[in-house]
Amino acid sequence: MTIMSQDLVASSAIPVEHAADMALAMKYASQGPRYTSYPTAPQFRQDFPLQQYRDWQGLEGDHKRDPLSLYLHVPFCHDICYYCACNKIVTREKNVAQRYLGHLQREIAMQSELVGDRRPITQMHWGGGTPTYLDHAQITELMHMLASHFRLLDKGYREYSIEIDPRTVDTSTIALLKGVGFNRISLGIQDFDPLVQKSVNRIQPFNEVAALVDSIRSHGFRSLSFDLIYGLPHQDRESMAETLRKVIALRPDRIACYNYAHLPERFTSQRAIDRLTLPEPNEKLLLHEIISHTLQDAGYLHIGMDHYVLPQDELAIAQQEGRLQRNFQGYSMRMADDLLGLGVSAISQIGDYYLQNEREIKGYYQLLEADELPITRGCKVNSDDKLRRHIIMTLISDLKLDFSECNRQFDIDFTNTFSRELDALAPMAEDDLLCITASGIEISKRGRPFLRNICMPFDAYLDAHKGDEAPPKFSATV
């Protein structure tokens, strides 16, 4: 054991294996993409071939009949959460949501005509902002808009989910969401410690969240997810252990644990956070290890990166069966190849194209008022992108890669084509993060927190940005 590892054990009073994992985390600490797409968002350009995309959509084919996922972005919040890096608008101005719905209706009608209204919507997700910023009548109105222009399903296998700020809903809202067709809920928990909550301006007592969880379960939702964040001000090992104790007591089906990135120069709300109250780097790594070991000891499976699920959860089963995918909503079951994003800043992945809507609401409104699609950035993937996307997304989702499948599907010799990338993975294999054989790559249990690092050698664009005056900024990989 290194001197650093000995110091970690002595200072944290945790088992040796935790310190060993922390030493690995320190060794591989870097910045990198979350790989919710490949190519990633920094490759989206304003001069992408939008007309070529529209011409392709005008053709008849399977892309007019195949299943489709919908993502809908509601950007509004009543209050600012200081840590937030989402595209949001904090306002209590009256009628702001109704004006947004009016413009959203125009986009829904235009996109339905272009993408097709016969495609079964097997998955749908409302995110934000805070989707429950909308009142009950507006939620009902928006779902009716979607049902009028797309083929929504009432089948049990559908996945219709919504993100909820627990401070914005009560039991009547939960009943309404179930009534209009949602069957999955994601709660933004972040942390249960009162001091941490106060420091990020998000007060939501445990008892209130517990009552909300009871209501969600009593209404028969198929799945409940929690979002947690580590690295917030005033978090330490004791407060995190207590938060995890409360989380485990509520037993959500899925838990996502995100690494807080303090970037006040990019996100002005983060300037309200006192930098001196943030955990030191070593303490932050320890928080990560406490989360990982505590959740797994409590029976959760680490399916990869920052996601943990109960063994009976559909994501765990999908991973075992090779039906897990990763996209802009994180991990989900592979129920549709195409994803249509609606609303300001929303991103679509359709066919060979990535498309992003205007990120500023004023510009979003102006384009729709001019009867134009609000798409302002995007890219078309080439053959090399498709190959590398297959490799990256397969590793992230299946935790293994079959060289012969790549050779067959893309007509390559994998070991020759990616000899440099395999050499870059060799130190990770020595650290037991993965195993490389003549037939493929397999990620070990120890390697699951390092999936982003493992994928980065296959990302052709990371090297392309080296030497740029302002290369893309990514979050910490661990």
Image: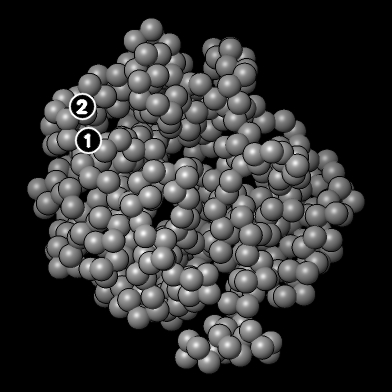
Looking at the rendered structure, the kind of residue marked 1 is: Thr
Judged left or right of residue 454, residue 249 is left
Identify the image quadrant of residue 433.
bottom right
Residue corresponding to mark 1: 91
| SS class, disc 1 | loop
Residue at the spot 30% in from the left edge and 57% down from the top edge: 200
Judged left or right of residue 138, residue 276 is right
Of all residues, the one furthest to the top in this rendering is 370
Q: Residues within 10 Å of mark 2 (few under 14, many from 20)?
A: few
Q: Position of residue 82 (x, y in %)?
A: 33, 51
Residue at the spot 74% in from the left edge and 50% down from the top edge: 458
The residues tagged by marks 1 and 2 sit, at their Cα atoms, a distance apart of 8 Å
Q: Position of residue 80 (x, y in %)?
A: 27, 46
Identify the image quadrant of residue 76.
top left
Residue corresponding to mark 2: 96
Looking at the rendered structure, the kind of residue marked 2 is: Val
The answer to whether marks 1 and 2 mark residues whose Cβ atoms lie closer than 8 Å is: yes
Is residue 345 at all visible to an observer of this figure? yes
Is residue 388 at all visible to an observer of this figure? no
Q: Is residue 355 above or below residue 27?
A: above
Screen quadrant of the C terminus: bottom right
Disc nearest the viewer among 1 and 2: 1
Q: Position of residue 382 (x, y in %)?
A: 72, 30
Mark positioned earlier in the residue sequence (1 or 2) = 1
Q: Residues within 10 Å of mark 1 (few under 14, many from 20)?
A: few
